[in-house]
Image (cartoon, rainbow, N blue to C red):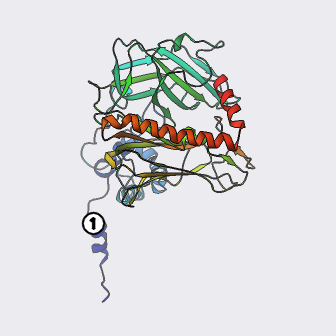
Amino acid sequence: MRMRFSSSILFTLFGFATTAAPISFNKDIAPIIYRNCSSCHRPGEAAPFALLSYADVKKKAKTIAEATESRLMPPWKAEPASFPYRDERRLTDAEIALIQAWVKGGMEQGSGEAPAPPKFASGWALGEPDLIVEMPAAYHIPADGPDIYRNIAVPLGLTEDKWVTAIDMKPTARAAVHHVLYFADPNGKAHLKKQGDQPGFNGMRPSASIALGGFALGAQAKHFPEGFAMQVPKGSDFVVQYHFHPTGKPEVEKSRIGFYFAKQAPERKMTRIQMPPHYSLFSGLDIPAGKKDFVIRDSYTLPVAVDAIGLGAHAHYIGKQMKMTATLPDGDVKTLLWIKDWDFAWQDRYYFKDLVALPKGTKLDTEIHWDNSAKNPRNPSSPPTRVTWGEESKDEMGSISLIATTREKSERTLLQKDYAEHQNQIVRAGLKADPTLGLKIKQLLAE
């Protein structure tokens, strides 16, 4: 028997009611905008206009409707995975429909007092930092020319070891800062190294340094989950490795960086499992001109049980798709991260709402896709040209990094040694297939 539903029943089933009050900014739209958009759309942040009031939102209402309907905004590239993420900015279908209906209905503000916009302490998304440092001198970025990699260091002045739960960065030349990597130099001497007339020095990360994460386009500062932090030894220098991309006009960069410290040392330490290692440098990344779907894969089986904390991915302009799955010992396959439409402009970290248990013997599989065809609207070369691994924006690289902690503290060293051997196997195979990679590494270290 075919069942028939009235239009009122259908609207009710999908969350709408024919007798509902008109959609208004104060009641319906402000909570969506303030929760998902205002952290970036405010003075001093990356977005080009503010969304902190009814007037702000009404002025850009049609743009907001188009961007949310296409899911271009808010920027959240990860598809729903097998485990929910923390701080998701993905709008629901009902929220998108509300915005569409509000714009089509005349963008009424509504009665009653307008809700207060979110407050951001001192302009910092995570509140006032425990420590703020500023780069010692401005770096002047030329209008044109090749991409620039530059390390700039500053003493932190720490008289005791600290544990960092988050780092936030405020660049002054946001358009020219492609990404940065953070390091702690326990020797405290990196700030003494000078090269040329400008502050800092070229080359790779300082020897014996401690990786502390980084900042990339589109990324939002986030605290690690409760109970996790990164150690910074007393007396350390903080080193920022900048990747500058000239914008067509001279830029001046002099960042302020905020540190957030844990009150005590964490009981469990984190380990990064990057796949493929070294951003695919040794994995045969050589993409022919016009190739629509170039793929590199990597697999690694966990030697111990771990709890997954979150993930991050990285590639350049022609990266297309990033995926990591976990095949459990019983054969069940779980999706940890799947970005179907990679966008160089929006690189984020995705922390799980809860720790994800991955038993010993779990197989991690990663695949990175690139599209070097003329049909890729993000391809920086027209016509397309051959693309190989490199640090320039028009070069390519790619990997997904899983941040995890071993279930048993005593097994962390075993995991690190086993993963290091996995890295070494890929490096040896890559050098055997292409001996010129050894020379490329020497050149990178010498720069």
Q: Is residue 221 left or right of residue 425?
A: left
Q: Residue at x 34, y 48 (%)?
A: 32
Above-or-below relation of 235 to 424 = above
> Which residue is outermost to the bottom?
1
Q: Residue at x 28, y 35 (%)?
A: 226
- Where the C terminus falls, by quadrant? top right
Measured as percent of width and height from the top left, residue 229 is found at 34, 30
Disc 1 marks which amino acid? Ala
Q: Nearer the viewer, residue 420 or 229?
A: 420
Q: Quadrant of residue 142?
A: top right
Q: Quadrant of residue 10?
A: bottom left
Q: Nearer the viewer, residue 66 or 209?
A: 209
What residue is shown with label 1? Answer: 17
Q: Residues within 10 Å of mark 1 (few under 14, many from 20)?
A: some
Measured as percent of width and height from the top left, residue 279 is found at 57, 40
Number of numbered labels in the structure image: 1
Q: Is residue 107 left or right of residue 190?
A: left
Q: Is residue 41 visible?
A: no
Q: Is residue 238 visible?
A: yes
Measured as percent of width and height from the top left, residue 346 is found at 51, 43
Measured as percent of width and height from the top left, residue 443 is found at 69, 27
Q: Residue at x 35, y 59 (%)?
A: 94
* Label 1 SS: loop
Above-or-below relation of 249 to 112 = above
- Where the N terminus falls, by quadrant? bottom left
Q: Nearer the viewer, residue 351 or 103?
A: 351
Q: Nearer the viewer, residue 140 or 328?
A: 328
